[in-house]
Amino acid sequence: MRIAVTGGSGKLGRGVVAVLREAGHDVFNLDRAPAPGGPARGPGFVEIDLSDYGQVADALSGVEEVFDSLDAVVHLAAIPAPGLASNVATFQNNMAVGYNVFEACRKAGIRRIVHASSETVLGLPFDVPPPYLPVDEEYPAVPNSTYSLVKHLEEQLATQLCRWDPELSVTGLRFSNVMDGTEYPGFPAFDADPQLRRWNLWGYIDVRDAGQAVLKALETRGPGYEAFIIAATDTVMSRSSAELAAEVFPGVPVTKQLDEHETLLSIDKAKRMLGYAPQFSWRDHV
């Protein structure tokens, strides 16, 4: 496939671009600036302001000497977390960029889209305990920040666009905290206090497995909208998941027998529907 990745210069984007290219796809990075440490302008990079709908619509319809059409778009570009910009700036940028990409895809006849949603829609930072553990996609979104609110609204927007256009396939990947190998040596320090990472149920996702999830979604999903939690198979902790749940979230029902370090961000739906199979753990690096 010919695939455009918005935000391909970021940490998540670089991992996704690498996985897609390794799988044999032609991948084009649409971003404000090239990836750090790479060439100032390399093949497949298109400089773009994604908040400008005209630029987005034009680029997704073809860029001279780069591509003349696209089979799919992976939308990752955004202010990537709460607290990095004002609430208004976060909302105005991320909501407009999401709409611009989705609508430009429809106008260009691109029927396969994968977008980065977020674990934050599950109720992070869980100041109010989750309804049950492990959390999954079955209960309504609980956005607790402007960043998370936009992710929820993007999911709703994509759902309605798929209703308007029955041939459209949009997949939302609710990524956990994206990590690469350079960050794993710091993980054992989390054991000192289970409260340090309670905010996302001690979850994470290796950037290479995040790329695998995108690849699986592109290759397997049919028409319509679906959202999936994407996390590693384990937690960031050395303590057992059952012990953590009992200590930090007493009284919250645990709906299954947990393996020793099993993630409390359920990836069962992604495994079942996408064939998602995480390969990487911080435990292999420390």
Image (cartoon, helix red, strand yellow):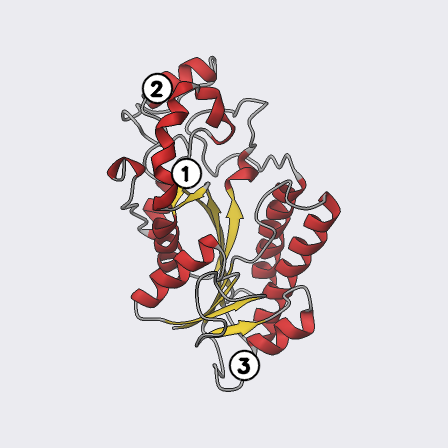
Residue sitting nearer the eye, 257 or 183: 183
Provide the secondary structure element on which disc 3 rests: loop
The image quarter containing residue 222 is bottom left
Label 1 is placed on what type of residue? Tyr
User: At which x and y percent is residue 33?
Assistant: 55, 66
User: At which x and y percent is residue 167?
Assistant: 50, 67
User: At which x and y percent is residue 224?
Assistant: 50, 58
Cα separation between marks 1 and 3: 36 Å
Provide the secondary structure element on which disc 1 rests: loop
Q: Which residue is mark 1?
A: 204
Q: Please give the label number shown on residue 123.
A: none
User: Alpha-carbon neighbours of circle 3 within 10 Å: few (<14), some, or many (≥20)?
Assistant: some
Q: Left or right: where does residue 218 sit relative to residue 140?
A: left
Which is more N-terminal, label 2 or label 3?
3
Where is 146 relative to 25, above or below?
A: above
User: Alpha-carbon neighbours of circle 1 within 10 Å: few (<14), some, or many (≥20)?
Assistant: many
Q: Which residue is mark 2?
A: 242
Label 2 is placed on what type of residue? Ala
Which is more N-terminal, label 3 or label 1?
3
